[in-house]
Amino acid sequence: KDFRRLCILKGVYPREPRGRAPGNKKGQVYYHIKDVRAIAHEPVLHKFREFRAFMKKVRKAAGRNEKDEAARRHALAPSYTIHHLVRERYPRFQDALSDMDDALTLVHLFAALPSEGRIKTKITNKAKSLAAAWGAYCTTTSSVTKSFISVKGVYMEASILGSTIRWVNPHSFTQHLPTDVDYRVMLTFFEFYETLLSFVLFKLYSDIGVRYPLSMAEAGGQAKGSASAVLASNLHALTNALKSSDGAVSKVVSEAVESVTKDSSEPKDKESKKKSRELIKSVGAALNKITSDDSDEEDFSDDEDVDVGAPLKAALGSMAEAEERSAIPGSVALDDDATKRRRLFAGLTFFVSREVPRGYLELVCLSYGGKVGWEGADSPITASDPTITHHIVDRPKLPSSFEKLPKSREYVQPQWIMDCANFLFVLPITKYGVGAELPPHLSPWVDDEEEGYKPAYGEEIERLKNGETMEAEDTDEDSEEDADENGGAENGEKDFEDEEDEAVTERRAKKKKQKEDEEAHKLAKTMMSKKASRLYGRMQHGLSEKQAKVDTLHKRREEIDSKKKRKRKN
């Protein structure tokens, strides 16, 4: 039991033996001798032994019916920390960031589990607070880059200090604990990941000028309830801390600047006078240049093509970016990609209906620059607020109570937010309306060029990004079909004959090319060795399998398109 806990905490994993395992030792677990020797000298092992001896004394006192003595001894239980193990396993901060995937997934899992059996309320509350602190940091720094809703949960990806971190957020359903899972192993992993995540959050929060852990006084009290409620309170606390830290930093900076200016006021007076004289001379020379340019008409006509407003435009653009960066409270410095993400939902206000899970949607909306409200007493926005632009609903039909709400808002399904965030483009809401059949939810991690197939909806979104309207294309297709139907019979026969001739020539050319390619492959194979030919055969087999999958996808797409055309005609 202690050996397994130590292996998990130290990061020691079983190893496969180099040779074949003996027949009488099958099913056994093997470790490296050096790993076992390192564990034998671990200080935490002594703490485990002390705790075991302590629990024997407590059990003896309880067996003698000395309840007061047992309670007194239980309060004096030996404790230990694993901070040195985290520093030992992750000597650099980037190493810890690159190994955050499993830690975040397990923490979000414990935050969604009920408090039953070995899983105590203290553990679930700690997991909720850690998950909320991580979400608050991601939204404040606009670190969320990709998201995808699947059967297992909501996959999220964030880019922090050059490291890509991906985790799974479970669906907000009632979780039933299976009996065939060893929760002691999971709790040991959570014990280590809790310490690791606390270290990482402390460093990240200190980089933006906030002290971690956040004080609940800034959040308006102790955070309790669901994970989304804890996330909201942590966000409130983080914004308050950023504002207070921003004020303190600016005060210190202003005081330092004043003291420096007082100390160096005398020598700088002479320097400023010299600079002002040089400035006056340079301005006079520039004015003389302008007058000479005005007298020469030919030079003026040549300079007409020069864009005089280009420097002004660049300056205005940089000022706009500086204003966007300064709109974020505190000393949070966003990179170019984060500022682009922050602009996506800028000026939009979302209201999440009660049937929609709020956690991951709030995370995505806030990290992309939007404002979020929900049904509850702690919501910053009420349902009847006229500033709401989008109302997120997951119902087949709107209830009659929604008729009292302002008509200026749009009702959309939750997938619209995820698709807009993944494509960094505000998509039209016609396909995401209430009760509408949703378009395919495309994964942002699939490389279409590598797969060799691009979905139809992905192509449609690319055309929308390029400025093409889908309605105009549909009308053009319908008009072409009508023109083909109403065209003369003679022209149709001539076109059909020409198309047949072209198809025959194309087939012959393709067959000829295929034969030439096959002959070249055969010649190349004869020149190869046996090993190279086998490797080449495996490569060709993999390529053919990949091409077969792409062909089946194209066939399915053609069938779906033909069905849609039939429905339109009917």
Image (tube, rainbow, N blue to C red):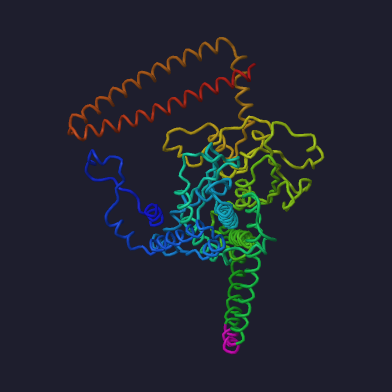
| Left or right: residue 549 compared with residue 405 | left
Residue 340 seen from this side: no
Residue 265 in the magenta stretch? The answer is yes
| Left or right: residue 142 compared with residue 377 | left
Please say if 255 is above or below 204. Answer: below
Please say if 261 is above or below 155. Answer: below
> The C terminus appears in which quarter of the rendering?
top right
Closer to the camera in the image, 365 or 529: 365
The rendered magenta stretch, by its main secondary structure, is classed as: helix
Residue interval drawn in magenta: 263-274
Closer to the camera in the image, 129 or 123: 123
Instruction: Point out residue 509 in the picture as x, y percentages from the top left corner.
Output: 35, 21
Closer to the camera in the image, 98 or 410: 98
Residue 312 in the magenta stretch? The answer is no
Residue at 51% of width from left, 58% of height from top?
Answer: 64
Q: In the picture, residue 53 is in which quadrant?
A: bottom left
Closer to the camera in the image, 152 or 277: 152
Residue at 47% of width from left, 12% of height from top?
Answer: 497
Please say if 180 is above or below 241. Answer: above
